[in-house]
Image: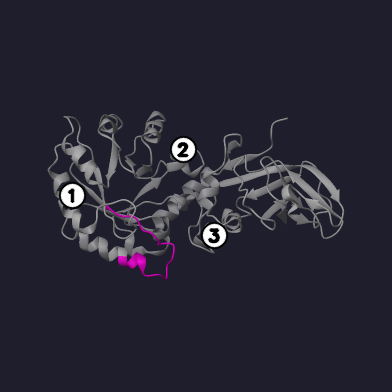
Amino acid sequence: MARPTSASIHTDALRHNLAQARSMAPHSRVMAVVKADGYGHGLERVARALEGADAFGVAALSDADRLRAAGLSQPIVLLSGFDEADDLPQLRRLGVETVVHHVSQVEMLEQAGPGEPIRCWLKVDSGMHRLGFAPQDVREAHARLSAAASVADGIVLMNHFASSDEFDKPQTRQQLQAFAAATAGLAGSRSLANSAAVLGWPDAHADWIRPGGLLYGISAVEGRTGADFGLRPAMTLSTRLIAVNRVGKGERIGYAATWECPEDMLVGVAAIGYGDGYPRAAPSGTPVRVAGHDTQVIGRVSMDLMTIDLRGIPEAQVGDPVLLWGPELPVERIAEASGTIGYELTCSITRRVRFVEA
């Protein structure tokens, strides 16, 4: 029998979340960020569901190639930018736009051979200090790109926020001010808002928003789920019980014997583990649902299996459905228990999980 672990992808939820993004930023165009295989949901599947977006954002040229092969004609933006001069012919062939974040890229564009001009998104380091030109270098970079024959008209100015998920902290406001000062008077559209900024910083919506996790129904804001913002989760991860065992009081469960049975009890075994992408770091007490009942993981998650507390579900039996996350159990709750974020969990689902379009 096939392993019963599956990830159901709700394309209607993707479309709903895109509509929510538009309603939150009604005067902005939307770049749907589909990097990391559509945040683990499947690149082509996600892009087709989000065909209403104004552009797609990817992190690798190979993803752009896949989107074009799938027949998607929208603008595609390479968010980390190109790495070497040999990438430029491929950008042209695929009609891909590129972020420019370093002087070495400016030099390669200045030295590029003849061909179709490439549209560029000039990245400003307004305070995250990862990629981008320092504020004092932005004007020179903009002038050089504007003068380069290989660069198309209409340079877009952009940045990336470090802590826009913290609505009450000053850093995002400081980054907005730094960006405004660095780009004052420069021609071009502006793009500032990632998912959290779409949700909590309307002053950052500008000409383009760049939602990622928001489109998949995942909140980047601590203590809040996507549903709190009117979003719908786009993935349901589920499996089934493959054993129900009676275990005596005082017996210990799983590797390293980390959980002790406080009484004689039923313990379920579900066909899922870190080999499927469920986090090994999920501790005892992490929520899970069995046949519609709330319960918890007990013991250590192993590669292929997890053990589940069935004390409140005496009728549980082999074959019962087990929900790991989805509309009835937000992925943010599992992420919080595991010390991570929902983005990482959906991106971590492995190839042996069966994907189903719902």
Q: Can residue 159 be found in the magenta stretch?
A: yes
Q: Mark 1 falls on what kind of element?
A: helix
Extreme residue in the left direction:
147
Q: Position of residue 160 (x, y in %)?
A: 34, 55
Q: Amino acid at mark 3?
A: Thr
Q: Are marks 2 and 1 in contact (CB under 8 Å)?
A: no
Q: Mark 3 falls on what kind of element?
A: loop
- Span of residues in magenta: 158-174
Q: Is residue 31 above or below residue 135?
A: above
Q: Whole-Å distance between the Cαs marked 3 and 2?
A: 23 Å
User: Which of disc 3 and disc 1 is earlier in sequence?
Assistant: 1
Please name the predominant secondary structure of the magenta segment in the image.
Answer: loop
Q: Can residue 75 be found in the magenta stretch?
A: no
In which quadrant is the C terminus drawn?
top right
Q: Is residue 100 above or below residue 114?
A: below
* Residue at 69% in and 37% down: 4
Disc number lying in front (1 or 3): 1
Q: Amino acid at mark 1?
A: Ala
User: Which of disc 1 and disc 2 is earlier in sequence?
Assistant: 2
Picture disc at residue 141: 1
* Residue at 81% in and 57% down: 261
Q: Which residue is mark 3?
A: 225
The crowding category of the residue bearing disc 1, from other C-alpha atoms within 10 Å (few below 14, some 14 to 19, many at least 20), is many
Q: Amino acid at mark 2?
A: Leu
Judged left or right of residue 221, residue 78 is left
Q: Position of residue 134 (x, y in %)?
A: 24, 56
Q: Which residue is mark 2?
A: 43
User: Which of disc 2 and disc 3 is earlier in sequence?
Assistant: 2
